[in-house]
Image (spheres, grey):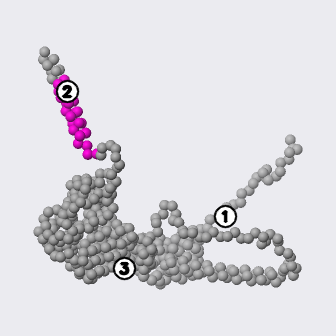
């Protein structure tokens, strides 16, 4: 009897668990927030319905979070994984300035809450920017920027700072770079993001003197860190101002000679550890070349930038071509004078002028190669031409010839990088031996001699 009672209790328990599981599944099916089947898919990007504080509001005692309300549920991971390299998440799509320290950005399904960790400071004009890239649950992406300006005391100013930020060494726009404008002596920064054309703009700034930085913000922390390329300038802002910022990696150690390799019998290419200052004049007096192992000095003819070397070789090639053409013309004239008189009376071939020359096709617009990046904007090209492109190479020419199989000691003194640091450097130039000519292939005698078909 006891065994039968225990069996019945187990069966009842199993039945109760089955009923509970079915009820949970039914409840999950009723709570599904997905779209019902059928109907056109929703492809509209998220729309901002309201913002608190409103743009233009003045709230001296602001304590609550700034709230951005959308028309539907937005994706919490908009902008990428926050733990990934370079940062991401909703915080990467929100700019709040001027602030000192971090900004707290939180997700609330259909809204985003924003507040500086230092709290709202009285007497400031804040700008809250919602950047493109916020997505909803259907992966629709918001592509427009929204800016909200509100104050905790003073009137909203109307000065504007605009400009262009480029990567000087790479010769392209600083796309996605960070602009930090700090009104001196304050340390709170006004922020902007560089667009795809290299341009940026900051509106509603109070007049004053600003320290403006353009930063390649690699880790996405909205700060200028070590080893990140940047450039800075001072601007006195009254109503409007425009600046151009040339970012590069600042190194306190000067450029050192890293490699020397031969180009021809009198020329070698020198490679440095970092780009050189284009305004630094390469001088042959800064270079010393010694033959190893006896340290015999070689006379240096010139130390040239790559562009100057290309121009020099182009001129030398043009002179050689003109000399060769003049020599060929003289040879033809001499041959014509020595030719027999009746050669000029020979009739020309009938088909020499019978076939007219085929018309040349008209050149069309150049098309970029497949897989290459599009050409930069023409206005950006004009800006990039304002400064020469930095190079990490120089060209060395000597009066004598480099001997094959020999080694040479090359020293360059006082090379200067883009931020003015100088250094001395050395390298060893090795001239390879010429490769021996390949031996002629000899065929066996049996292959060269004809085979006698009559021999058994």
- Left or right, residue 422 beside residue 221: right
Instruction: Indicate the quadrant where residue 164 lies.
Output: bottom left
Name the dominant secondary structure of the magenta segment. Answer: helix
> Residue at position x 15%, y 68% from top?
120
- Left or right, residue 408 beside residue 386: right
Percent coordinates x, y for residue 336 in the rendering: 80, 81
> Residue at position x 75%, y 54% from top?
443
Q: CA distance from mark 3 to mark 1?
A: 49 Å
Instruction: Indicate the quadrant where residue 70 lies.
Output: bottom left
Query: Secondary structure beneath disc 3?
Result: loop
Which residue range is magenta in the image?
11-34
Mark 3 and mark 1 in contact? Answer it, CB < 8 Å: no
> Residue at position x 29%, y 51% from top?
137
Disc 1: which residue: 437
Disc 3: which residue: 420
- Mark 1 or mark 2: whose residue is earlier in sequence: 2
Percent coordinates x, y for residue 71 in the rendering: 25, 56
**Is residue 337 highlighted in magenta?**
no
Query: Secondary structure beneath disc 2?
Result: helix
Disc 2: which residue: 15
Q: CA distance from mark 1 to mark 2?
A: 92 Å
Foreground label between 1 and 2 = 2
Q: Is residue 50 visible?
A: yes
Q: Name the quarter where the N terminus is drawn.
A: top left
């Amino acid at each position: 009897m006891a065994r039968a009672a225990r069996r019945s209790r187990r069966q009842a328990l199993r039945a109760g668990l089955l009923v509970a599981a079915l009820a949970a599944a039914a409840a999950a099916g009723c709570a599904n927030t997905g779209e019902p089947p059928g109907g056109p898919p929703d492809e509209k990007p998220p729309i901002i319905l309201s913002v608190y504080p409103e743009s233009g509001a003045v709230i001296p005692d602001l304590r609550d979070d700034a709230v951005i309300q959308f028309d539907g549920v937005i994706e919490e991971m908009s902008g990428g994984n926050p733990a990934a390299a370079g940062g991401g998440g909703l915080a990467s799509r929100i700019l709040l300035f001027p602030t000192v320290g971090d900004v707290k950005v939180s997700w609330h399904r259909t809204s985003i809450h924003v507040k500086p960790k230092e709290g709202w400071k009285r007497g400031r004009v804040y700008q809250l920017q919602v950047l493109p890239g916020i997505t909803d649950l259907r992966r629709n992406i918001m592509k427009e920027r929204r800016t909200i300006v509100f104050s905790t005391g003073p009137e909203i100013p109307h000065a504007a700072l605009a400009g262009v930020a480029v990567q000087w060494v790479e010769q392209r726009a600083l796309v996605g770079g960070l602009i930090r404008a700090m009104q001196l002596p304050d340390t709170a920064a006004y922020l902007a993001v560089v667009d795809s054309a290299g341009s940026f703009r900051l509106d509603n700034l109070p007049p004053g003197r600003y320290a403006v930085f353009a930063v390649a913000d690699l880790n996405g922390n909205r700060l200028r860190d070590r080893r990140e390329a940047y450039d800075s300038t001072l601007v006195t802002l009254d109503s409007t101002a425009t600046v151009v910022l040339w970012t590069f990696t600042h190194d306190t150690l000067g450029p050192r000679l890293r490699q020397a390799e031969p180009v021809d019998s009198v020329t070698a290419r020198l490679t440095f550890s970092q780009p050189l200052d284009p305004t630094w004049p390469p001088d042959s007096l800064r270079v010393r070349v010694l033959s190893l192992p006896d340290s015999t000095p070689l006379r240096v003819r010139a130390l040239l930038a790559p562009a100057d070397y290309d121009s020099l070789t182009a001129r030398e090639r043009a002179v050689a071509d003109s000399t060769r053409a003049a020599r060929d013309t003289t040879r033809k004239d001499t041959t014509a004078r020595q030719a027999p008189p009746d050669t000029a009376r020979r009739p020309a071939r009938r088909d020499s002028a019978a076939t007219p020359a085929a018309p040349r096709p008209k050149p069309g617009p150049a098309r970029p190669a497949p897989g290459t990046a599009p050409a930069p904007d023409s206005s950006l090209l004009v800006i990039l031409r304002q400064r020469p492109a930095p190079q990490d190479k120089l060209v060395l020419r000597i009066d004598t010839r480099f001997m094959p199989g020999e080694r040479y000691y090359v020293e360059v003194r006082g090379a200067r990088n883009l931020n003015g640091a100088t250094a001395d450097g050395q390298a060893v130039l090795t001239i390879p031996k010429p490769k021996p000519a390949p031996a002629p292939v000899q065929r066996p005698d049996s292959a060269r001699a004809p085979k006698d078909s009559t021999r058994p």
